[in-house]
Image (cartoon, rainbow, N blue to C red):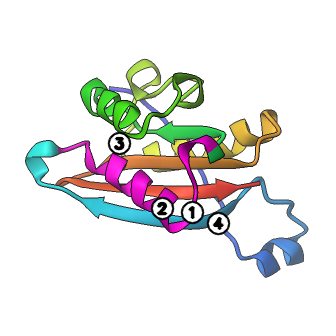
Amino acid sequence: MSDGAGCVLLASDDAARDAGVDPLARVVDYAVAYDDPKWFGTAVGDAVASLLEANDLAVSDVDHFEINEAFAAPMVHVLDRLEIPEERFNPHGGAIALGHPIGASGGILTTTLAHSLAAADATRGVVGMSVGGGGGIAALLER
């Protein structure tokens, strides 16, 4: 078990401008995929692939992937299937090393990605995770 908390403030361009806030990143698009629940954990790869295809991007166009690795085997599948270079996949450690606080993981992953892009002066990142019942979700962020 691990403890954790995260906060993501999502606002329109107008609301951020009115509040005088300089956003860390913007959400460009997202994708959802579902697979047979017995293959839990693999649908996140489908969601990432769909997201990249919908935005006419290759893996090489993405600076950083932040994918929740609640289990090791599905992440090996995602790395191999999409041919993501290991140095761009969870470069600060994933849930196996850092924990997976239920209910906070999505916010933590998104916040980690946004701050990592800013620290590296990078442009584009993908965040993703598996969801119960065989689902997967991914979002494309840009600075």
How many angstroms separate mark 4 from mark 2 (CA)?
A: 25 Å
- Amino acid type, callout 3: Ile
Q: Which residue is mark 1?
A: 56
The mark nearer the N terminus, 2 or 3, is 2
Residue 113: image location, x then y, percent: 63, 42
Disc 2 versus disc 3: distance between alpha carbons?
Answer: 30 Å
User: Looking at the picture, which amino acid does disc 2 mark?
Assistant: Glu
Spatial CA distance of label 1 from label 3 is 32 Å
Q: Secondary structure at mark 2?
A: helix
Q: Main SS type for the magenta part?
A: helix
Q: Nearer the viewer, mark 4 or mark 2?
A: 2
Nearer to us: label 1 or label 4: 1
Q: Residues within 10 Å of mark 4 (few under 14, many from 20)?
A: few
The boundaries of the magenta stretch are: 40-60
- Quadrant location of the C terminus? bottom right
Q: Is residue 21 left or right of residue 3?
A: right
* Marks 1 and 3, the one that precedes in the sequence: 1
| Residue 140 shows up from this direction | yes
**Which label sits on residue 53?**
2
In the image, what residue type sits under mark 4? Leu
